[in-house]
Amino acid sequence: MARRPPPPGPGRDTPWGARGRDTAGPARESRPPRAAGRADGDAAAAPVRGTELRLHGMNAVRAVFARRPQAIRKLYLAPERIPQLQPMLKWCVASRIGYRVVEDVEELRRLSASTHHEGIVADVLREAPQSLADWLASLPEGPCCALWLDGVGNPHNLGAILRSSAHFGVAGLLLPGDSTLALSGAAARVAEGGAEAVPLVRLAAPADAMAQLRAAGFTLAATVVRGGDDLFAGALPARLVYVLGAEGQGMGETLAGDCDLRLSIPGTGAVESLNVAAATAVLLAQWARHPR
């Protein structure tokens, strides 16, 4: 079979259609869906078909391509991104995955529901959360840190938590069974690629989850605004789960009471507390600084 030519350079139409039209992919979608959103609409993820997620931002999309390229279903990119994305575009051509060069910046904003698209939008298959049992079975022996997110819901906070978690090597984000938290395009962009480095884990009943975590050698530490032990005063367990609550109401008192430790980040008192994402970075840095 004759080889297809490489993806186009700037200023050229493709052999499969004029620039701005679908290229190099099957005809399952002749026109990209558009998503309504505010100009600063990071908080409103673009609606995409059930098992798919719409991503935007260079690092978020590149991270998917590096780890699981088969998850990519379609790309939309600004003309100036073509030289930087040659390997991805060549892979799309070889794999018959559609890409579309979009000259209208406003259209990219509509597709991503954000002004922060950085010239690239991608529809990708959503990665399902793992079960706690499967996640525990995959862990290596030795030091390990995870985060239990109780009530955290803001996508920007989730993205910042994922970014810090990837930086410090967190093994997983644990989500209660009734949590509506899920990765969105806004969260993935803020994570700057970290969403592909840290798995999401879906928990069952809290008591059962705690029992399984303790059986695997983990200590559970409730992070509280006040009344906890000083985070910086002593050593932390090698296998640790930080339990974090939502801003404002914090975590449920029952959950905090069921944990093995209560930890607080000391400060001046000039403000009530740190943002949950900022607090996460402090907590992880303190765990990581202790030699194991």
Image (spheres, rainbow, N blue to C red):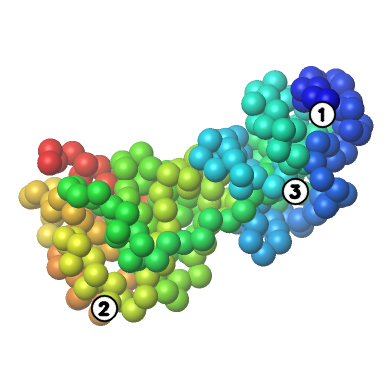
Pointer 1 or 3: first along the chain: 1
* Res 111 label: 3
Name the quadrant containing residue 263. Answer: bottom left
Of the residues shown, which amino acid type is indicated by label 1? Met
Of the residues shown, which amino acid type is indicated by label 2? Ala
The spot of residue 78 in percent (x, y) is 75, 32
Give SS at disc 3: helix
Give the CA separation, mark 1 to mark 3.
35 Å
Looking at the image, the residue that sits furthest to the left is 234
Residue labelled with disc 2: 207
Give SS at disc 1: loop
Residue labelled with disc 1: 1
The quarter of the rendered structure image containing the C terminus is top left
Q: Residue at x 63, y 61 (%)?
A: 51
Give SS at disc 2: helix
Give the CA separation, mark 1 to mark 2.
59 Å
- The number of discs equals 3
The spot of residue 242 in percent (x, y) is 26, 59
- Give 4 or 282, whichever is nearer the viewer: 4
Of the residues shown, which amino acid type is indicated by label 3? Leu
Name the quadrant containing residue 25. Answer: top right
Classify mark 1: residues with Cα within 10 Å, few (<14), some (14-19) or many (20+): few
Asked if 78 appears above or below 255 in the picture, the reply is above
User: Which label sits in the foreground, 1 or 2?
Assistant: 1
Q: Residue at x 18, y 67 (%)?
A: 215
Question: Looking at the image, can residue 60 be seen?
Answer: no
* Res 77 label: none
Pointer 3 or 2: first along the chain: 3
